[in-house]
C-alpha cells in the first residue's frame, strides 16, 4: 500500500515526448491549468508543483508527456545517442528510458530493447506504442545471452544498462524502510544486495564486449555503494583494457560519486532528499571516441 502513496515532497517532473510534441507546445498546454517551469538541466523536462496529479491528463494519455523523475531522465542524455546509431537498451522494461533514447535519436537508427521477463515485455511494448517511436525492436531475452560477436551486433554504438537493482533510491523503498519490521531483515538484505551486485557487474562486463561500442551508461535507482561505485570500481580495470574510460556527463552537476576511487568524481549521484530520488549514473567512453573525465 505504501507504494501507492504519491511522493509529494518533490516537484512533479514530466518529460515531453518530442516524438509527439515540442516542448513549448507542451508548456503552453500545461500552463492552462498549472504553473509550469522549464528544467535548467534537461531541455525536455518540465516542472510542475508538488503532488500535481496528471494520471488522467490528455497529454499523458496520448503519450505526449511521460511522468518521469529528473534523475531517471538524465540517463539517456548521458548516453547521448545520435540519430542513426545502433543502440541496445539491455534491461528495458517498462521502457521509459528506451523511448527517451528513441526521442533523442529522432526515431532514426535502431534500438534493440532487451527484456528478460516475459510478463514485463507487454508493458514495454505498450510504452513504445504510446510513444510513437518507430525504430525499436523488442527482444524477450537475457542480455547475457546476446552474443557480442554476432555480426548483427557489430555496429552497436552504445548500450544503456539500467539493470535490476534494490530500488533503494526510490521514494516507495525509502518509505518502506520506515517500517519497524524492516530492521529484522538486514542479513537477507545484504545477501540480496550482493546477488544484485554480482549480476550488475556481470552485465556491465558483458556490455563491454561489443566490438563497435563507443559509449556505455550504467545506471541504477539505488543509493547503495555496493550496487554503484563498487560495481564501477571493480569493472574499471577490465573496461580500461578494452580502451574505455570513465567520462563526466553533466559536468555542472554538483552531486558526484562517493570518493572511493580515483575518477569517482566522473560519476553522478542524485540525493533522494534534494532531487526526489536516489539515482546513479556512470558513463564509459571508448578512449579514441571522446574526451575523458579529466577534460
Ligand atoms: N530502464 C527501465 C526504464 O527506465 O523503464 C527500467 C529497467 S528495470 C530497473 C530492470 C529491468 O531489467 C527489469 O524489467 C528486469 O526484468 C530486467 N532484467 C533483469 N535481468 C535481465 C537480463 N539478464 N536481461 C535482460 N533484462 C533483464
Image (cartoon, helix red, strand yellow):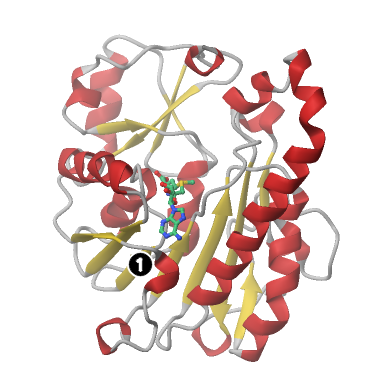
The percent position of residue 243, horizontal first and vertical second, equals: 59, 89
The percent position of residue 178, horizontal first and vertical second, equals: 74, 17
Image check: 281 left or right of 119? right
Residue 108, above or below 48: below
Image check: 91 left or right of 78? left
Residue at 17% in and 41% down = 20
Residue at 17% in and 61% down = 135
Residue 191, above or below 135: above
Q: Residues within 10 Å of mark 1 (few under 14, many from 20)?
A: many
Badge count: 1
Residue at 52% in and 49% down = 164
Image check: 257 left or right of 280? right
Residue at 20% in and 47% down = 19
Q: Quick one: SS at disc 1?
A: strand
The percent position of residue 199, horizontal first and vertical second, equals: 59, 61
Q: Name the residue under label 1.
A: 88
Quarter holding the C terminus is: bottom right
Amino acid at each position: 500500500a505504501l507504494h501507492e502513496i504519491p511522493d509529494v515532497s518533490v516537484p512533479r517532473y514530466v518529460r515531453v515526448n518530442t516524438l509527439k510534441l515540442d516542448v513549448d507546445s507542451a508548456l503552453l498546454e500545461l500552463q492552462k491549468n498549472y504553473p509550469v517551469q522549464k528544467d535548467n538541466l534537461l531541455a525536455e523536462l518540465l516542472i510542475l508543483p508538488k503532488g500535481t496529479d496528471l494520471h488522467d491528463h490528455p497529454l499523458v494519455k496520448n503519450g505526449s508527456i511521460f511522468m518521469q523523475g529528473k534523475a531517471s531522465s538524465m540517463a539517456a542524455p548521458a548516453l547521448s545517442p545520435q540519430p542513426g546509431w545502433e543502440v541496445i537498451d539491455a534491461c528495458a522494461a517498462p521502457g521509459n528510458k528506451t523511448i527517451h533514447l528513441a526521442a533523442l535519436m529522432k526515431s532514426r537508427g535502431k534500438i534493440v530493447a532487451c527484456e528478460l521477463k516475459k510478463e514485463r515485455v507487454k508493458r514495454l511494448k505498450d510504452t513504445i506504442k504510446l510513444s510513437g517511436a518507430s525504430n525499436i525492436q523488442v527482444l524477450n531475452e537475457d542480455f547475457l545471452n546476446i552474443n557480442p560477436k554476432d555480426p548483427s551486433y557489430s555496429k552497436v554504438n552504445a548500450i544503456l544498462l539500467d539493470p535490476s537493482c534494490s530500488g533503494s533510491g526510490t521514494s516507495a523503498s525509502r518509505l518502506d524502510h520506515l517500517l519497524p519490521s524492516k530492521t529484522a531483515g538486514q542479513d537477507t538484505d545484504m545477501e540480496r544486495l550482493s546477488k544484485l551486485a554480482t549480476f550488475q557487474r556481470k552485465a556491465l562486463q558483458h556490455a563491454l564486449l561489443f566490438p563497435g561500442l563507443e559509449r556505455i551508461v550504467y545506471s541504477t535507482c539505488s543509493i547503495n555503494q555496493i550496487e554503484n561505485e563498487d560495481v564501477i570500481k571493480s569493472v574499471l580495470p577490465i573496461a580500461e583494457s578494452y580502451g574505455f574510460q570513465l567520462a563526466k556527463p553533466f559536468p555542472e552537476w554538483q552531486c558526484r560519486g562517493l570518493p572511493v576511487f580515483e575518477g569517482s568524481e566522473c560519476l553522478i549521484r542524485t540525493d533522494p532528499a534534494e532531487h526526489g530520488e536516489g539515482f546513479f549514473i556512470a558513463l564509459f567512453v571508448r578512449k579514441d571516441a571522446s574526451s575523458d573525465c579529466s577534460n
